[in-house]
Amino acid sequence: MGSAAAAVMGPAGATALRFTPASDPLQWRPALLRSAGPGRWALANITVALFYCTLGWAVSQFFSKYGIFPSPIWLPSSIAVIAAMLGGWRMFPGIFAGSLVANYALFDPTAIEAVAISVGNALGPLVAVAALARLRPEAGLFNRLRGVVAFIACAIILHPAISAAGGTLTLHFAEGLPTAALPGVWIKWWLSDSGGTLFFAPALMLWLNMEREAIPRSDSLIVRDPVFWVLVGLSGALLVVPLPIEGAIRWSSAFLLVVPLTWIALRISLRAAYTLISIVSVIASAGAVAGFGPLHGEGVGNPMQLAGVLVVLLALNVLTVIALVAERRAAEEANRLKSMRLASASHDLRTPLNAIIGFSDVMKNQVLGPIETPRYREYVDHIYDSAHVLLDIIDDILDLSRIEAGRHDIAPELLDAGALARSCVEIVSIKAEAGGVKLSLEAGPDATVFADQRALRQILLNLMTNAVKFTPGGGTVTVRVAPASRREIVFAVTDTGIGMSAEDIEVALQPFGRIAQNGVPSEKGTGLGLPIAQRLAELHGGRLTIDSKPGKGTTIRVILPSVARPLGEDAGEPPAAARGGWR
């Protein structure tokens, strides 16, 4: 059996790639072959053919010693896939020739059968790689989950399917293979090529630098990190020396390898982890046919099948974990860059805005002489007030960007919670009176909070201002301050305003999220007050919760430490407010 492609190595050995967008058909081609002439391409094809037939001979010789023929795992399929990725259709002769020689030497087919099977073995990887090039994310196959899925769909499923179909149909028409036997032969052929590709292709891709790793590689740790060598030793022991027990525990112990392999992938590199997976694949397959290791024993019907399941689990787990971690890091980096751009733009806006505020203040107070026209004085007031509104928005953007970039420092201290809340109520009361909203405070005596004074003031002002803003005239806003537990205090702001649905709450907690009313996004505010309050509460090791129903008002609670303790330390007992104490 055979199929798919190999790594092309020129006279100077494997050459690192310069990565290009996924739409570029040369994305995996090394510089050595980008401008290669006929001679270099001929040498590349000869190299592929030699690797293909040599590896095929070695695999067949090993399995035939134990009476297994043809090979249940066809490792040359990895060579075919890599060759197709590096050279595309120009590598057809090398893959075809390697398969042709291997088939003639190992399977004794007729000339027509050998040619037909080899055409299928060459077409499979080439078609699959052409599809993979279109599906490959720009960030790389192994740095995005959809890239891993594309690799599995094309290289592990499609490529062996085409090769197996070509071989099975050849046996049907040339040797009279019964129709009823076609599905079984096709499945065995497909499993052989699929396993061979999964065993080695990803490791070859990483060692040839065909795919980059989003998580910085630390292969130097392989040499000096004793933990790595301990894990390698334990991995080998699990596969060679079975536990002195019988039953499922004996053979399932090999699946514990998923833990050290995941650690190596995250701590060192995907390349190191998948190299070890390739080694594990060889040891597990050898043990399955030679009769040693934990995959033999009571309750194990097919050791080779169990070895295949083990390798598939290890490979897919490592590839999936790395892809998800890379996606998360990419999202965090994108968020950090966005915050930096926002901060930079906000700083650039403050300079001309300060000039507008300064000059409009001079005009508002008529420092240089009276303004005779009343309409002009009204315009100056509007300019001054609007500039301050814009300055507040910029300050909010700067605060949010600093928090999200991890650059917002706080200096917690023990504060009088009631006094601080009272000062905030006095500030917001002017706006509440102007809107016909009754604003009141209920604060217990001697309540303390361990918080940064400026940050806590900003949290309370944001919550109170929002409550007043979204409460119609005649409504009420009540601020309560009371102990929530032995070590926590709760600030609760309750209003009788428009309320929010569960979907609205999710929107409100997102930066720049504005709730739609009657299908139209609200024009009140910028959507930064709640996100900033939530993030500031979390910086203190606290939390913000929201209870709300449309038309029935909203209660927002901020639970913070009431005594000095390390930030982020679990307070233990859940606060009464979080358990529904405030209603």
Image (tube, grey):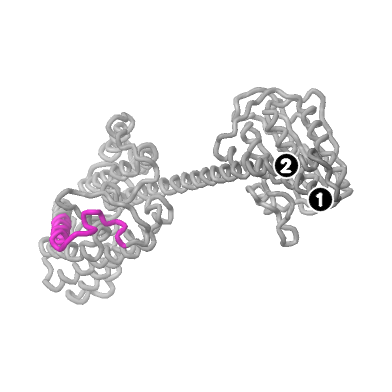
- Can residue 469 be seen here? The reply is no
Q: Quadrant of residue 488?
A: top right
Q: Give amino acid for label 2.
A: Phe
Quadrant location of the C terminus in the rendered image = top right
Label 2 neighbour load within 10 Å: few <14, some 14-19, many 20+:
some
Residue lying farthest to the front in this orientation: 369
Q: Quadrant of residue 398?
A: top right
Highlighted range, magenta = 25-52
Q: How many marks?
A: 2
Q: Give amino acid for label 1.
A: Tyr
* Dominant SS type (magenta): helix
Q: Where residue 579 appears, x then y in whole percent?
A: 72, 38
Q: Is residue 40 magenta?
A: yes
- Taking the spot 85% from the left edge, 40% from the top edge, the residue there is 430
Give the answer, above or below, for where 481 lies relative to 14: above
Q: Where residue 344 appears, x then y in whole percent?
A: 56, 43
Of 395 and 477, the residue lying toward us? 395
Give the answer, above or below, for where 186 lies relative to 415: below
- Taking the spot 15% from the left edge, 52% from the top edge, the residue there is 58
According to the picture, the residue beneath numbered tag 1 turns out to be 376
Whole-number angstrom distance, CA of label 1 to CA of label 2: 14 Å
Q: Where residue 372 appears, x then y in whole percent?
A: 86, 48
Give the answer, above or below, for where 307 lies relative to 123: above
Task: Describe the element under mark 2 as helix, strand or loop.
Answer: helix
Task: Describe the element under mark 1 as helix, strand or loop.
Answer: helix
According to the picture, the residue beneath numbered tag 2 turns out to be 359
- Can residue 393 be seen here? The reply is yes
Q: Earlier in the sequence, mark 1 or mark 2?
A: 2
Label 1 neighbour load within 10 Å: few <14, some 14-19, many 20+:
few
